[in-house]
Image (tube, helix red, strand yellow):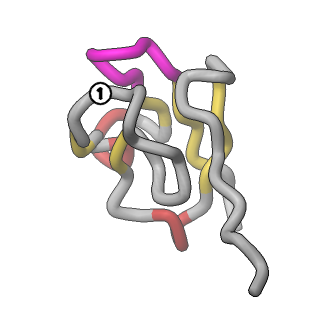
């Protein structure tokens, strides 16, 4: 049985996402949560396609599809 691959949280400072990833929250789905922060939703569509997580400072950029 293959083990699901997880994304290391807080490993990058900039993430590019698409509309398929909305609603945006940090940490992202697939990130291991044991060493991260509580999930926070980020209003990237209302902030011009850019959002910064108030906990870890990760920057998210909404790419055009």
Q: Residue furthest right?
A: 2
Quadrant, the N terminus: bottom right
The image position of residue 37, as x and y in percent, is 29, 27
Image position of 55 with respect to 22: above or below: above
The image position of residue 29, as x and y in percent, is 47, 58
Magenta stretch encompasses residue 55: yes
Asked whether 50 or 15 is in front, the reply is 15
Q: Is residue 52 left or right of residue 31?
A: left
Q: Is residue 15 left or right of residue 28?
A: right
Residue at label 1?
37
Q: Is residue 30 left or right of residue 52?
A: right
Q: Which residues are magenta?
A: 52-58
Quadrant, the C terminus: bottom right
The image position of residue 35, as x and y in percent, is 41, 27
Q: Residue, x 64% and y 46% (percent of image)?
A: 7
Asked whether 63 or 10 is in front, the reply is 10
Determine which quarter of the picture holds residue 47.
Answer: top left
Magenta stretch encompasses residue 38: no
Q: Secondary structure at mark 1?
A: loop
Q: Residue, x 67% and y 69% (percent of image)?
A: 4
Asked whether 5 or 55 is in front, the reply is 5
């Amino acid at each position: 049985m293959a083990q699901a691959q997880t994304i290391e949280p807080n490993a990058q400072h900039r993430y590019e996402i698409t509309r398929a990833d909305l609603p945006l929250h940090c940490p992202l789905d697939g990130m291991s949560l044991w060493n991260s922060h509580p999930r926070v939703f980020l209003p990237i569509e209302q902030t011009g396609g850019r959002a910064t997580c108030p906990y870890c400072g990760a920057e998210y950029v909404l790419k055009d599809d």
